[in-house]
Amino acid sequence: MLHEDFSDLPDLEKWRWKLKPVDTGFGTVRSLEKVSSTFVTHADLECVDSRYLLCGLSDGGVAIYDTSLIKEGRIYSEVAAVKGGQRQSHQYQVDCVQWYPADAGLFITSSRDKKVKIWDPNHMKTVDQYRIECHILHHCMSPVATKHSLLSVSGDSGEVILCDLRSGSSVHRLQGHVGPVQITQWSPRNQHILVSGGKDQTVRMWDVRAGRACLMALDMENSLCKTTKFKKRSKNVPQAHKSCITSLCFTHDGMWLLSFGYDGHLKLWNSTTGDNMEVKYEEAYTELKKTIHMAISYCTYPDLVFIPCREEILVFDLLSGRLLNVLQGHFLSVLGVVYNPVSMDLYSFGIDHNFITWTPKKLLKSCLSNEENKETVKIARVKKNTRQRVKHEVTQDAWSSDED
């Protein structure tokens, strides 16, 4: 996807809470069915088929949507849901949801009601839950773990709580932050490496196997004191931002870590050395001090960063920091975005009760000019002829085929 794949939406009827389905220059806009006055507060896409979208709701309920089934009016089909106020739901709004990384057989939700719930999506019932003695802000499971089933839980206690889904234990605590821990993320490269960001303006990297778990605190000045030569709650801990950390995200290969703070600065870090790469991203201010969900594309060139900025979504080139586009369509602050690596769609949700799907223009046949269509057909014919020549030159087995 390139710069021209994204274009702004036209003005919409701002008095409507529910976004009308419209055709835009960017692509096709679709929405979820609006249930009463609830709205999506957090979302996650399962990584097996990249099809089922899990949504946490403002009334404490949860819902699952099939993004491959679109009903009339460009509305995703609801697969299952538990509305707020029921015995299974949370008491307050759902602040974080996540599919079990290995398959779509479980999902996890958390809320400020001090509960982490593990759900069976086939019956939409809770199979287990943890009661944490603090207000929960975020939770996360490792996408690559094979030797542990740890769930990291961050809250206003200043600790990162590790819950073991196998044993049911939640006694392991990572201490060091001063004040609430806003967010945690596991490395997709090393199953034992965990990163946390707090209201104390620090981003810390942990090895959950070690006795002294904190490996380093990331330093925006790239000074030599970013190693663990400081006390757990020392005031001399290097700072990553000038305000509280609101979002963390690894790239798909785990080489880079992105952090976003309430100071409006987006920073790119080397996940191995902890160096600040000093990429100059444009400031992206947010009015929300709570955790927000940003996304990074992969299998694209260049890799793109999608970051909520008030009621807009800024699109950056990951490595150069160049602002590629501004996606406009929400009327109030955007809470988060989710990227679909299969369809290359982007899902966004905000406190304006709208859920929007952004489809890259280049993926829509209707957006191709006649010249591009002719060129595409010409390339397809060349590839077909090439495959036919190769077919006569090599021995073809019965298991696979280039024609499939």
Image (tube, helix red, strand yellow):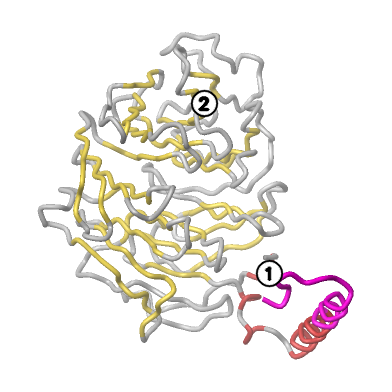
- Magenta stretch bounds: 383-404
Which residue does the image show at 51% across and 78% down from the upper left? Answer: 28
Tell which tag, 1 or 2, sits nearer the viewer. Answer: 1
| Residue 70, position as x, y percentages in the image | 40, 79
Label 2: element kind: strand
| Residue 391, position as x, y percentages in the image | 83, 77
**Mark 1 — residue?**
400
Q: Are marks 1 and 2 in contact (CB under 8 Å)?
A: no
Q: Quadrant of residue 271?
A: top right
**Mark 2 — residue?**
205
- Is residue 28 placed above or below 232 in the rendered structure? below
| Residue 178, position as x, y percentages in the image | 38, 21
- Is residue 11 placed above or below 81 in the rendered structure? below
- Name the amino acid type tagged 1: Ser
Taking the image as shown, residue 111 lies to the left or right of residue 85, namely right
- Is residue 287 placed above or below 199 in the rendered structure? below
Taking the image as shown, residue 270 lies to the left or right of residue 384, namely left
Among the two numbered marks 1 and 2 on one chain, the one whose residue lies closer to the N terminus: 2
The residues bearing labels 1 and 2 have C-alpha atoms spaced at a distance of 44 Å
